[in-house]
Amino acid sequence: TQLLEQSPQFLSIQEGENLTVYCNSSSVFSSLQWYRQEPGEGPVLLVTVVTGGEVKKLKRLTFQFGDARKDSSLHITAAQPGDTGLYLCAGGIGGANSKLTFGKGITLSVRP
Amino acid sequence: EAQVTQNPRYLITVTGKKLTVTCSQNMNHEYMSWYRQDPGLGLRQIYYSMNVEVTDKGDVPEGYKVSRKEKRNFPLILESPSPNQTSLYFCASMDRGGSNEKLFFGSGTQLSVL
């Protein structure tokens, strides 16, 4: 079983601060996805990265896939209370996303 | 509106009383899956289905059954629930193929087994 380690597990910051969180593995993935989950709801896909070294931006969120496709980072610029939630990374193997492996998630709280 | 619908949202039951959690999607997706989410353990896959009449075990299938008789529905069955199956359950579907596969999740079913 491929394991995805996410860090830090919990993060509480003030509105306006920048932050970076990580998703690491010893395994190579063909794709990596980031989801955000709000209380009482299911996870919602934010981005998929498929190429080593790929960087994708979604407004104030910047996602990077490691060169070796074993790790990923999520950087949030000027965090807002609306960014509060659980951030999950999920790795797919060989295009068969039927075996998406999820990390345990990062709980982010942005205080006004 | 594209969506995955789970029912019920909340369920309290007693040990040994059979229950079914329903899941339906309106996107004509071939792939559907069930997950459970527990504090400190994250999302773990229970069962998945690549198409009608095709199901396979995920990482934690013990104590669960599924069926896929039609494309839109993928019910999760607990024949004899036990307290360790108390959890938050999510159904998801996906349109497979290409590099932009994404899982669409339902809103979850909070199950408590007493």
Image (tube, coloured by chain):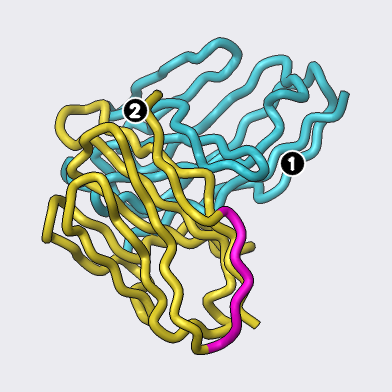
Q: Residue at point 72% right, 15% down?
A: A78
Q: Left or right: A92 with respect to B36?
A: left
| Quadrant location, the N terminus of chain B | top left
Among the 4 quarters of the image, the one containing residue B15: bottom right
Name the outermost residue toward the right.
A112
- What colour has chain B? yellow
Query: Could you say whether the residue bearing mark 2 is in a helix, strand or loop?
Result: strand
The residue type indicated by label 2 comes to: Val
The percent position of residue B91, horizontal first and vertical second, equals: 40, 51
- What colour has chain A? cyan
Q: Nearer the viewer, residue B36 or A72?
A: B36
Q: Which residue is mark 1?
A: A11
The residue type indicated by label 1 comes to: Leu
Label 2 resides on the chain identified as A
Q: Residue at point 55% right, 64% down?
A: B41
- Camera sees residue B105: yes
- Camera sees residue A97: no
Q: Residue at point 46% right, 35% down?
A: A34
CA gap, disc 1 and disc 2: 24 Å
The percent position of residue B64, horizontal first and vertical second, equals: 36, 75
* Mark carried by residue A49: 2
**Start and end of the magenta stretch?**
B9-15
Q: Left or right: A6 with respect to B1?
A: right
* Mark carried by residue A20: none
Q: Residue at point 88% right, 23% down?
A: A112
The answer to if B11 sits in the magenta stretch is: yes
